[in-house]
Amino acid sequence: MVDIKEYIKSQTGVYGAWKSAKEISTFKGGGQAFVFYPQSVEKAVELIDVLGEENVDFSMLGNGSNTLVCDGNCRQVLVCLKGLCGVKIDGEKVVCEGGASVAKITFEGRKRGLGGLEFLSGVPCTLGGALKMNAGAFSSQIGDYVTKIDILNIDCANCDKNRTQNRIREISVNSKDLAYRKGVDGIVLKAELKLAKKSGEQSVNEAREYLRKRQEKQPSLPSLGSVFKNGKIPSGKLIDDCGLKGVKIGGAQVSQKHANFIVNVGGASAKDYLTLASLCKKEVFEKFGILLEEEFVTIE
Ligand SMILES: Cc1cc2nc3c(=O)[nH]c(=O)nc-3n(C[C@H](O)[C@H](O)[C@H](O)COP(=O)(O)OP(=O)(O)OC[C@H]3O[C@@H](n4cnc5c(N)ncnc54)[C@H](O)[C@@H]3O)c2cc1C
């Protein structure tokens, strides 16, 4: 029997391969997933169409900095847009493809005397992943810097499937449309950002300062950033108050430095991560009656 993933590779000509969690998730623990890497918008659309036609359950992958890869072989297939990483700057208009890293956007903007995303220094994310999660830090969020997004319609009954452009919807974004860690729906192909005039020196200094503050409070071991979204009381404080800092299950540990981070101290599995996250959730609920909400995404 022909493997469906190999069939899709041959149908679309898009490269795909099994990739370990070490390669595709910043937690660096878990099993492996089959990842497709389209290198153009047209190929991404064609691939997603074929995945849909063949009823293959898929999910998008950016840099995997919020993504836990289940143990063993994941059932879900991943589509990674890191090959779509162009950044075009015309005056103050910055147009970036969904797979561009936020670090690259900041770097390219800086070369043209533009800045704004320094608050995300040290967050290892792509633009697509950041917009999906409405990534933020230090009271700023990426949604504040985006004006338009090109979204791929997956379920578009009235669209002509043979005409890629018909299926790409440009949406105007108002920062109020995006909530805390709740970004856009759909697949982010491209976005227009509004960055402000800023000297390279100022941008570098701000980025360094944000990074310094981050390193002071957050662990450097592999993680997925915050495990839980923050409410009125920061989740890290609630977990800490339950005495869970440093608690270990297998290779996963509630960070000694920041209790809302689960770090991989060596050889952690996805199950270790999930069991520890569940323990934190249970203890916080039992002690404070507060139900924590996961921020990370799990690939099944
Ligand atoms: C050290 C560290 C620090 C962090 N600090 C912060 C922080 O300060 N603030 C914060 O908000 N987060 C933080 N995070 C979490 C993480 O970086 C963010 O959630 C980030 O937005 C995820 O981006 P990514 O490209 O890695 O996405 P991934 O983890 O690859 O994917 C995340 C989600 O986005 C979806 N997605 C990816 N690409 C696309 C696309 N093109 N179109 C549509 N959906 C897509 C995926 O399907 C998934 O649902 C941190 C993580 C780490 C490891």
Image: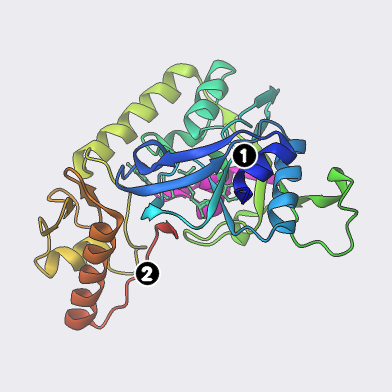
118 or 300, nearer to the observer: 300
Identify the amino acid type marked 1: Gly
Q: Position of residue 1 (x, y in %)?
A: 61, 51
Left or right: 86 as drawn, with respect to 285: right
Identify the amino acid type marked 2: Glu
Mark 2–mark 1 distance (CA, rounded to whole Å): 26 Å
Magenta residues, as a range? 129-149
Q: Which residue is mark 1?
A: 98
Name the residue at 67% across, 61% down: 55
Q: Position of residue 278 (x, y in %)?
A: 26, 70
- In what quadrant of the picture does the C terminus appear? bottom left
Name the residue at 75% across, 51% down: 49
51 or 202, nearer to the observer: 51
Name the residue at 55% across, 29% down: 105
Queried whether the magenta region covers residue 32, the answer comes back as no
Q: Position of residue 68 (x, y in %)?
A: 38, 53
Number of marks drawn: 2
Q: Is residue 84 above or below residue 28?
A: above
Q: Which residue is mark 2?
A: 293
Ligand 1 closer than 8 Å to the CB at disc 1?
A: yes
Query: Which of pointers 2 and 1 lies earlier in the amino acid sequence?
Result: 1
Q: Which mark is residue 197?
A: none
Q: Position of residue 186 (x, y in %)?
A: 66, 56
